[in-house]
Amino acid sequence: MPAGADDDLILQIRDLTKSFGPIRALRGLGFELRRGEIHGLAGENGAGKSTLMNIIDGILRPDSGEIRLDGVPVDITSPAMAQKLGIGLVHQEIALCPDVSVAENIFMGVTSTSRAMLMDYRAIERRAGEILHRLGDIDPAAMVRTLSISQQQLVEIAKALTLDCRVLILDEPTAALTEREAQVLFDIMRRLASQGISIIYISHRMVEIFDNCDRVTVLRDGQYIATMNVADVSPRDVVSAMVGRVIDELYPPKQAAEEKSGEIILDVRGLSEKRRFRDVSFHLRKGEILGLAGLIGAGRSEIVKGICCLEGEVSGEVRLNGRTLRLGHYADSIREGMVYLSEDRKGDGLFLDLSIAANVSALAVEQVATGAGIIDDRSETAQAEKLGSRLGLRCGHVGQPVSALSGGNQQKVAIAKMLSVDPRVIFLDEPTRGVDVGAKAEIHRILRELARGGVGIVIISSELPELIGVCDRVLVVREGRISGEVAGDEMTEDRIMYLASIGEDRKMAS
C-alpha cells in the first residue's frame, strides 16, 4: 500500500476486490489520494483502472474491501450518491444526449431535478457559456450532434466542472483534444488542485503524467504495483512497472536513407470542398509514413474523408500509382485500394456486438461468400485468423465479440478490416486513441511494417509526440489549407504548433 499521513488523505481504498464471473478484475487493490494533488493512474488496458473508477463513482459495487472519504467509511451505491459526496467522473467514452443543446447537456442534472414549470434556456446558455469560455470556442446553444468528437469531449469536461467536486476523476480526457486544448485543460487542473480539489488523472500518455501529476500509481492485472513521486522516476520506470517488462522502443526506426524512394504512391492536386478546405495538394512516397497535424477544425479529417468520398462535394485530382481516379462513393475508393479508419473506433470503425471474424470481413464480404451470396464461415474464420496472426491480435477465438477485447486489440481488428481488401493506401485517424502504451508500440510497429511492405500510410493525430515519433514527414493543416511541411530536425512540437496556429505560406517541397 502507498504510504501517507491519514489527515492528508481525502480518499483511501483498501483491499478492494471485484470479479465478473470467472474474471478477477481487482485483486485486493489499494489506493490513496491526497488533498489538492493531481495523482496519475497508469496501467495497460485490462489493468483494472476503469473498474476501480467505476466503483469509486458508484457505477459498480465491489465484492469486498473498503472505501474511506475523509477517513470515514462510505458505501457508494450510485453515481448520484458519488456526486453528493463530492466525487465527479469524466468518462473516456462520451455519454451526451445528441439531440439537445450543449447547455442542456452541461446542466442536465440540475434541470432534471428543477421544480420550475418552464426552463430558462437563456440563463443556462449564459452559465454554460461562462464555463465553455475557459475550454474552447463552443456555442452553448448548438446541438451536440453537430459537434466534433473533440468538442464533445470538452462538453463532458465542462459538465464535471459544474459539480461541487472534492474528488475529480478524469479518464483519458485529452484523447480527443489537440495540444492547445489539452494545455488549457492542464491549466484548469492545476488551478483546481491549488483550490484543494483532488484529481485522479488516468492517461496512457506518459508526457502528460510527468508534466502535470505529483504522484503516479501503477496497476497491473487488477493489482496495486507501486506509487511513485513523479519527480523521482522516469517514464521508463513507470512503463516497466505497467507491463512487467522493459519496452525498448515506443516508436520503430524511421526510413533509412537507403530506403527512401522517389516513387509516388498517392498524388493529390488542388483538392477543394467549398466549405471546409481548399487547394490542398500533397503526395505520399513509397515506404514512408506521412502525418497530418493541425488544430481542431483545421480540416485534417475532412480532407482525408474528401479523398475517399466519405463526405462533401470535392473537386480536384487524386492520382494513385500515376493513374487518375474517378470516385463517386466510398465503395469506389475501397475498390481502388484506399481505405479510411475513423477516429471514432467504437462509433464508426467497428461493430462491437459482432464477432471478430465478421468485423474483419465487413468491407468486402464477397471475398468470404459462396456463389449464392451466403457467408462461408470457414473462409471468414480463416481470413480473420490469418490477419489476426499477422497483427499479433490477442483473443480467445475469432468468433468472440469485439466488445470483449481491450482497446488495443479492438484497434488491431479495425486495422485487420482495412487489410482484408489488400489496400494500397490506408488513412488512419487517431490510430492509438485510448490505447495503452504496450499496444501503442505494437500498432506503431505494424504501421511501419506495412509501409515497408509497400502500403501507403497517412496518419492524422492530435498527439504531436506520436506524429514526430512515427512519421517521416508531417504536413500541417490550418484553416482548410496546408500551411507547411516538416521533416528531419525541423519536426518539432514548436514548429508544428507555429504552422498550425500562425501558418506560413510557402510552396510544398516536391
Image (cartoon, rainbow, N blue to C red):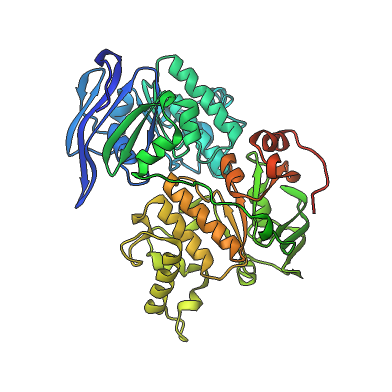
Residue drawn at (64%, 61%) of the image = 287
**Relative vertical location of residue 331 with respect to residue 85 in this rendering, above or below:** below
Q: Where is residue 457 in the image (x, y as percent from the top left)?
A: 61, 58
Residue 429 appears in the picture as rendered? yes
Q: Quadrant of the C terminus?
A: bottom right
Q: Is residue 373 left or right of residue 44?
A: right
Q: Quadrant of residue 52?
A: top left
Pick out the residue farthest to the bottom: 371
Q: Quadrant of the N terminus?
A: top left
Residue drawn at (70%, 67%) of the image = 327
Pick out the residue farthest to the left: 64
**Relative vertical location of residue 15 with respect to residue 374 in this rendering, above or below:** above
Q: Where is residue 219 in the image (x, y as percent from the top left)?
A: 31, 38
Depth order, front residue of 103/330? 330
Residue 463 appears in the picture as rendered? no
**What is the count of numbered marks?**
0
Q: Where is residue 481 in the image (x, y as percent from the top left)?
A: 75, 45
Residue drawn at (71%, 40%) of the image = 490
Q: Quadrant of residue 296?
A: top right
Q: In this view, does 129 lie to the left or right of 308?
A: left
**Relative vertical location of residue 104 with respect to residue 439 in this rendering, above or below:** above
Pick out the residue farthest to the front: 258
Q: Position of residue 136 (x, y in %)?
A: 59, 30
Q: Is residue 194 left or right of residue 258?
A: left
Residue drawn at (55%, 61%) of the image = 449
Depth order, front residue of 243/125? 243
